[in-house]
Amino acid sequence: MQNSRLELNFGREILKMLPSLAGAAARRLGRTPVIMEVCGTHTMAIARSGLKSVLAGCIELRSGPGCPVCVTDQRDIDRIVALANLPGIAIATFGDMLRVPGTGSSLELERARGACVEIFYSPLEAVAYAARNPGKEVVFLGVGFETTAPAIALSIAAAAGQKLPNYTVLSLHKLVPPVMETLLSDPELTVDGFILPGHVSTITGRKAFDFISLKYGRPAVVTGFEEIDILQSVCLLLKQISEGSARTVNGYKRLVREEGNKKAKEILAEYFKPADAFWRGFGLVPQSGLAIKEKYSRFDASAKFALDTPETQPPKGCACGDILKGKLTAPDCPLFARACTPSSPAGPCMVSSEGACAAYYHYEWSEQDREVN
């Protein structure tokens, strides 16, 4: 109870400071400060808590490339759908991937047509499923950032330990620092500061993001997912913007270390190597993905199965790519709440539980907006 009161009082103090800090930052910039929350979990936390409306008039918040399902390239979705239709294949996946539309289909549609698609909460469950079903080739979809990859690496270790011949991983993992480099190199980027992902930073460490301030002169704050964490990070960013300074600050010291998680990094280095990867909206980003090392190639679905698919284009009018780059917001998309809704999504940002469009639709789109549309 005492801690709750302290947090409440701290939150009130922060809210009192925000207008003056935002005013000072705006005077220095000559416009409203723009801050990007990179992580999809932050996007959902901000929408669910109503923080965007609280901060309206002080700052403009933009979402970034921090939703792993959303940044999965359209061509990779098509590869997954094609893989699901190969004889004897069982696709194992986290639930978010099920409804993401490819060019002509989705895993959900293919499952309805008879493909074997199984939902798991842990990759180790998929390994156990492969052991129980030796007649199936179980392919786990490795979708996620630095936080997800160690658990999937351990599933390869478990499959190797059991000498399973029928378990592979399709590694579509992404690394956040390289895509931040690509984002910051965009001359059209108008973001003044970054709220950095707490989960990813527990693995990478704060120092992995130092380049944002040292090379590009933008302030950044690693932070947690409570409202008080996010508000505090906004204050720290506004203070730096108003001063004209730029540092990458660790606002999540209870979990994030300077160098990150040494053990998790060792696990990643054992099973994966950095590789070029395609991101939705960004195209090919050098060394931004994780490929399975050659010594574990028997667990690599891309080496075991022919997965080439033609280059594809996103649905006409879909703005997911520009939303992930912070150039547009969800309601700027011409398909939003019209041709694209949670029950009939055109793009992944409306499907994923961390997607910017889903967040806006569920928590920020008013009843009046719904009537107009």
Image (cartoon, helix red, strand yellow):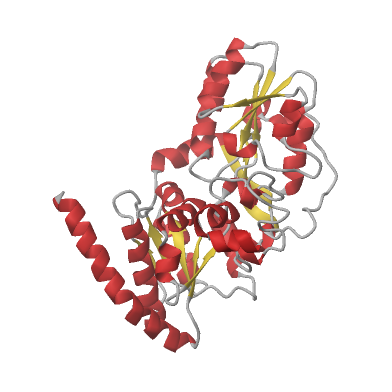
Note whether 221 is above or below 124 in the view shown.
Answer: below
Rendered image quadrant of residue 299: top right
Against 79, is 247 above or below?
below
Q: Is residue 12 left or right of residue 220?
A: left
Judged left or right of residue 64, residue 341 is right
Q: How many labels were placed on the picture? A: 0
Based on the displayed image, in which of its 4 quarters is residue 93 positioned? Answer: top right
- Rendered residue at 53%/32% (across/down): 153
Q: Residue at position x 24%, y 70% from top?
A: 13
x, y (%) of residue 192? 49, 75
> In terms of image quadrants, where is residue 356?
bottom right
Q: Is residue 211 left or right of residue 284?
A: left
**Residue 64 vertical placement versus 2 (above, below):** below
Q: Quadrant of the C terminus?
A: bottom right
**Can residue 138 be seen from the camera position used here?**
yes
Q: Picture coordinates of residue 36 (x, y %)?
A: 50, 66
Q: Name the residue: 54% across, 59% down.
A: 367
Residue drawn at x 48%, y 53% as measured from the top left? 44
